[in-house]
Image (spheres, helix red, strand yellow):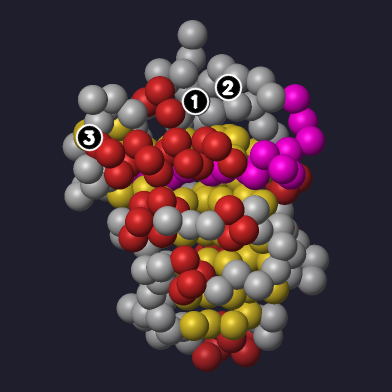
Amino acid sequence: MDLRKYLNPIKADKIRIGPNCDGGYVVVKKYLSPYLYSYGVGNQVGFEVHYNNLVSNCRLKLFDGTIDIPNKFLALYQNAIFFQKNVYHEKDLDIKEQNVFVQMDIEGAELDIFNSMSIETIQKIQQLCIEVHLNHASYEQAEQFLKKLNQYFYLVHIHGNNHQSDKKFGLPVVLELTYVNKTSWIDLVTSEDKHCPVNSLDFPNDKNALDLMLDWWVS
């Protein structure tokens, strides 16, 4: 069983937002939204701070039930709201606006959420950076997840999280994927011809280990 056939990125003009290590993501600058929903903040807010500095009049909504966001951060960024809760279901996402940017790292719950997500919510997401955890997923669950994303989004970037070198279904067990909604895309759709990691964009999540080479889409 191999899921690589569902992960074929297209070309896009990309930048990196956040630190050059775990917590940073490669995105398409053209499709940044003034509304950032960040699910699974973790112990650092480098991505959110950098995003806020890039996007004028940004509104940040951060969700994580495992941490306390420092009051200093909320005072400094008065356009930010922190919800001390984890997300497990579509209703927990609480997306109010249209054409939002979603960053999601919720340790495996992302598959169930997207597999049951309504088209109405999907079409509110303009760009999606998502960490996918295949550790405990069945092939059927993972396949449904990737097929559904491909139905509504273009995959524009893929990176393997090198904190775990194991593979499952032909893939690293933890993947960082970036998607842009097809309804927002205005550029030509051309297959990517670069392997991952991409110099100056991708960096190892674990600085003490080699990054994971991914290139099955390169002919």
Are there few (<14), some (14-19), or many (20+) residues within 10 Å of tag 3? some
At label 3, which amino acid type do we have? Answer: Lys
**Residue found at the far top of this picture:** 219
Q: Quadrant of residue 22?
A: bottom left
Q: Where is residue 48? Give x, y as percent.
A: 58, 66
- Residue picked out by circle 2: 192
SS at badge 3: strand
Q: What is the span of residues highlighted in magenta in the rendered image?
A: 173-188
Classify mark 1: helix, strand or loop.
Answer: loop
Mark 1 Cα shell of 10 Å, populated few (<14), some (14-19), many (≥20) = some
Please state which of the two labelled residues, at mark 2 or mark 1, is closer to the viewer: 1
Distance between mark 2 and mark 1 Cα atoms: 8 Å
The residue wearing badge 1 is 8
- Which one is in front, 39 or 46? 39
Q: Is residue 57 above or below residue 13?
A: below
- Identity, as a three-letter code, of the amino acid under mark 1: Asn
Q: Please tell me which residue lies in front, 183 or 29.
A: 183
For the N terminus, the quadrant is top left
Q: Going 42% across and 56% down the picture, which residue do you hit?
A: 116
Residue 144 in picture, x, y percent from top left: 38, 40
Q: Is residue 99 magenta?
A: no
Mark earlier in primary sequence (2, 3) = 3
